[in-house]
Image (cartoon, rainbow, N blue to C red):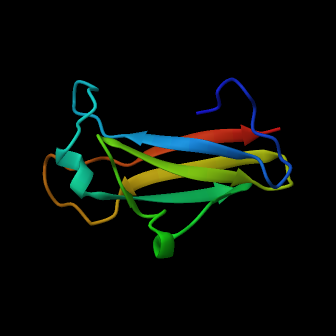
Amino acid sequence: DFEGVELKADGSDIVAVRCYMLDCEENIVPIICDNHPIKFTVEGEGSIIGDSEIGANPICAEAGIATILVKSTTTVGEIKVTAEIFWKQNMWGAIKPAELIINSK
């Protein structure tokens, strides 16, 4: 959710990253998926603000959307954000993980 503004590599710039829980037709699935915590991981030149102690990660979706805040480092580069269901799933209709690449400038 850049709002048209690039993420600056200044160590304090923040971007909201939203994970939409979608069905096979790419419709947001509210309520049903809200009981499943989403675990986010960040690799590269960024970090998640908050952790499990404050309920920031993993986090349950609200109305089918889970949101975290990612903060830049002071190094320009790529930030890889992964979102996946916190609990292991072993069923045909398992919710698939997703990745997002953000480039700080």
* Viewport quadrant of the C terminus: top right
Percent of width and height locating residue 34:
25, 50
Q: Nearer the viewer, residue 19 or 97?
A: 19
Note whether 50 is above or below 78 in the view shown: below
Taking the image as shown, residue 86 lies to the left or right of residue 93, namely: right
Note whether 11 is above or below 20 in the view shown: below
Percent of width and height locating residue 99:
49, 44
The residue at 79%/53% (across/down) is 12
Residue sitting at the far bottom: 53
The residue at 61%/41% (across/down) is 101
The residue at 22%/30% (across/down) is 24
Q: Quadrant of residue 84?
A: bottom left
Note whether 39 is above or below 24 in the view shown: below
Taking the image as shown, residue 47 lies to the left or right of residue 61, namely: right
Q: Quadrant of residue 50?
A: bottom right
Taking the image as shown, residue 39 lies to the left or right of residue 45, namely: left
Q: How many marks?
A: 0
Percent of width and height locating residue 94:
21, 50
Note whether 15 is above or below 23 in the view shown: below
* Viewport quadrant of the N terminus: top right
The residue at 47%/47% (across/down) is 67
Taking the image as shown, residue 88 lies to the left or right of residue 8, namely: left
Q: Nearer the viewer, residue 38 or 98?
A: 38
Percent of width and height locating residue 69:
59, 51
Residue sitting at the far left: 92
